Image (cartoon, rainbow, N blue to C red):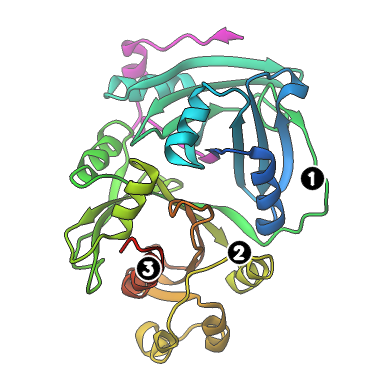
Amino acid sequence: MTTTKTPTLEELHKNAADDFLPLNGTDYIELYVGNAKQSAHYYQHAFGFELVAYSGPETGQRELASYVLQQGKVRLVLTTSLIPNSVISGHVQRHGDGVKVLALWVDDAAKAHAETILRGAVSVSEPKTTFDEFGVVVTASIMTYGDTIHTFVERKNYTGPFLPGYKAAKSLFKTTPVGFKYIDHCVGNVALGDMNKWVKFYEEVMGFKLLITFDDHDISTEYTALMSKVVSNKNEYIKFPINEPAEGKKRSQIDEYLDFYQGAGVQHIAIATDDILHTVSELKSRGVEFLSIPGYYYDDLLQRVGKIDEDIQLLRELNILVDRDEEGYLLQIFTKPVEDRPTLFFEIIQRKGAKSFGKGNFKALFEAIEREQEIRGTL
C-alpha cells in the first residue's frame, strides 16, 4: 500500500475546469450491519442481488467481514465488525443497520479529495493506493451529514471483482434479479435547521447545483410536515435530496427517523427500473413489504396525470404511485423500513421522461407513512 501524492493548489487551479469534481456515478453504497452474512442472504433472496465479492477472515481480514452484492449498476456492500470495540460496532450500536458510505466513482480520487478539502470538506482518509493482481485502485474519503461519508473511488486501472483485499464470490443459491438498473437518488435526513447548511456544503464544497426546493406547504398533511431541497452534480448522475422536519401538529417521519437513528443519516435509497410492474410484483412475491395507498388515490388518477401506458388496475393492486412533470411521468413505490428500527427504506422508481421526484404524490405517501407511525406509536 502506498500513498498517492496530493496535487498542489497551483496544480489544481492550473487544471481547473468548470466542473472541478466530475463524477461518473455511484460506485457503491456500504451499510454497516450487525450480521452481514444474514443481511446478505436477505438482499440476495428478497431483492435479487448476486454475491460478487467477499472480504473477511478467509482473505486475511481479521476485524471485519464484507459481502459485495450487485444487480445492474447497483452495488451494495454489507459490512459487520468481528470485534466488539470498533468504529463499525459503535456505528451499529448507535444507529442500527445503516448506510455508512456513499461512494462516488471518479477518474482521479486524489484530485477529488484535494478539490473538496480546499473548499472546506473534512477529510476522513487521505488518498491511498491499493493493488493486487488485478491492478490498482485509489480511494479517499470526506465527511458529510451525521456519520455518513463520501468515498471517492478511482478504478480505471482495475479489473478485479470489487477492490483489492476482496476475493470473487458467488451466491450459494440461484438468485433472480428483479430489474434493478442503477441508483436514481439517495435521500438524507438532517436535524431541524441543518438542511440549508448541508445544501450549502454540496454547492460550495462539491460543486453541486440546487435542482428543486419543497417547503412545508408542498410536503404536509393534516398532522406533519417536512422541508426538502434536492442537489445534484453537474451531469445529474448523482442526486441527493436533503430533508429536515417542519413544525406540525404531530411528530413527522423525519423526527421519527432522527430519534431511532440517533442523528442524521441516509433515509432511503431510490433504485431505478425499466419495468416497475415486474419489479414490484417480484419483490412482493419474495416478502418485501410496501406502504399501502388508499384505493381512492386511483379514482381520478388519469385526470391528474393524463394518459399513461400502464393498466390502472395493476397499479392499484400493487399500490404504485404516478406523477407527471413537464418532461413526462414517473411511477414510484416505497418499501416499509427494511429493519426493525423505522429508519432505512427503499424506493423503486421508473422514469418515463419525468425528471422530478413525485411532488403530486407527497400527500398520499406521507399519509401512508403516518399510518405506519401510528401503528408504531410514534406519530
Q: Is residue 94 above or below residue 366?
A: above
Res. 327 image quadrant:
bottom left
Q: Quarter of the image containing the C terminus?
A: bottom left
3 or 1: mark nearer the eye: 1
Q: Can the viewer see residue 97 in this picture? A: yes
Which SS class for mark 1? Answer: loop
Which amino acid does the dot numbered 2 rest on? Answer: Val
Mark 3–mark 1 Cα distance, whole angstroms, equals 35 Å
Is 133 located above or below residue 356 in the figure? Answer: above
Apparent side of residue 344 relative to residue 199 in the rendered image (left or right): right
Q: Nearer the viewer, mark 3 or mark 2?
A: 2
Q: Give the range drawn in magenta.
A: 1-27
Crowdedness of circle 2 by 10 Å Cα count: few (<14), some, many (20+)? some
Residue type for callout 1: Ser
Q: Quadrant of residue 148?
A: top left
Give the residue at x 43% y 87%: 298
Could you tell which of marks 3 and 2 lies nearer the N-terminus? Answer: 2
- Nearest to N terminus: mark 1 or mark 2: 1
For numbered disc 2, what is the local secondary structure? loop
Q: Position of residue 303 (x, y in %)?
A: 37, 90
* Residue tagged 3: 358
Q: How many labels does the image show?
A: 3
Question: Which amino acid type is shown beneath numbered disc 3?
Answer: Gly
Confirm whether the magenta stretch covers residue 184.
no
Q: Is residue 233 visible?
A: no
Label 3 with label 1: CB-CB less than 8 Å? no
Task: Please name the residue that numbered disc 1 is placed on.
Answer: 171
